[in-house]
Amino acid sequence: MTTRILKPLLGSGVAAGVLVPVLLWADGATRPGYSLWHHGASQLGTGERAWLQTVNFVLGGLLLLAFAAGLRRVLRGGRGATWGPVLLAAAAAGLIVAGLVPTDPALGYPPGQPTGVTTGGLIHQVAGFALFAGLSAVAFVLARRLREASRGWAAYSRLSGALIIAFAFAAGIAYRLDVLGVWRPAPAGLLEHLSLLTGFCWIIAVGVHLLRGHVPGGLKHTSGG
């Protein structure tokens, strides 16, 4: 694969990392009836301007798939060369499905819509799990490989992986407390947004790192793993 093709593939990760969270926060901050503190990111795929987040999730997922292809080429072999791109592709697929299959109304958004769990909502939940789990797992998987660049990269990757899953888990707890009336309004939305922001910031950082220092040769690799 030539540098002419590889650079756009790696740049796709940077583009996805900027596009998805920026559009989520910009839309959420200006959407009538929507609260970045209270409502999850997926709720933007319902109600007014729902099409915008459908485009955001699908395009972001396609960009992540392109980045996974570039990552596979750069790693070439050794630690994380197989599972890193596979996990990233799984996260990308989850983002695409989450865009195409909207979630159910919840926590009063969209206003006036009845709540309940539908088949589409369950599919969306599975897609969301693939997204968060994939982003977290790929950060952990590539931590050892990135350690060959520096210990700082390994620590940053592990921290990112831990925060992605911790924020997502905390968002689920906050959502349940809100539904049960224990804490209203609980910060389920803010925690979920922070999980996504952590993951996409890591994607941006890795993409820029590879573009600046490892194109077209790639990261050095050791045997095995």
Image: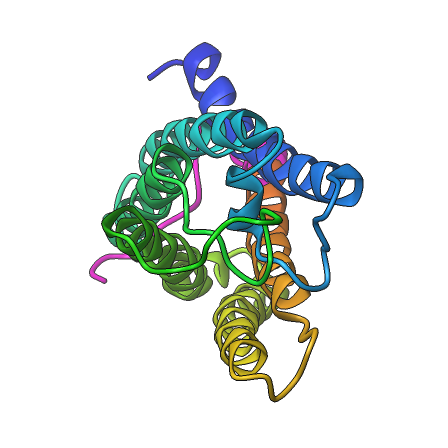
- In the image, is residue 126 above or below residue 32? below
Image coordinates for residue 64, horizontal then vertical, percent = 43, 35
- In the image, is residue 93 above or below residue 119? above
Image coordinates for residue 53, horizontal then vertical, percent = 55, 33
The furthest residue to the top: 4
Residue 215 at least partly seen:
no
At 60% across and 58% down in the image, what residue appears?
108
At 36% across and 46% down in the image, what residue appears?
88
What secondary structure do most residues of the magenta stretch adopt?
loop
Image coordinates for residue 146, horizontal then vertical, percent = 48, 57
Q: Give whichever of 137, 82 is nearer the camera.
A: 137
At 58% across and 47% down in the image, what residue appears?
110
Q: Give whichever of 130, 209 is nearer the camera.
A: 130
| Magenta span contains residue 154 | no
- In the image, is residue 18 above or below residue 171? above
At 39% across and 13% down in the image, what residue appears?
2
Magenta residues span 209-225
Q: Quadrant of the C terminus?
A: bottom left
101 sits left or right of 218 in the view = left
**Color theme of the render:** rainbow
Q: Give whichever of 140, 116 is nearer the camera.
A: 116
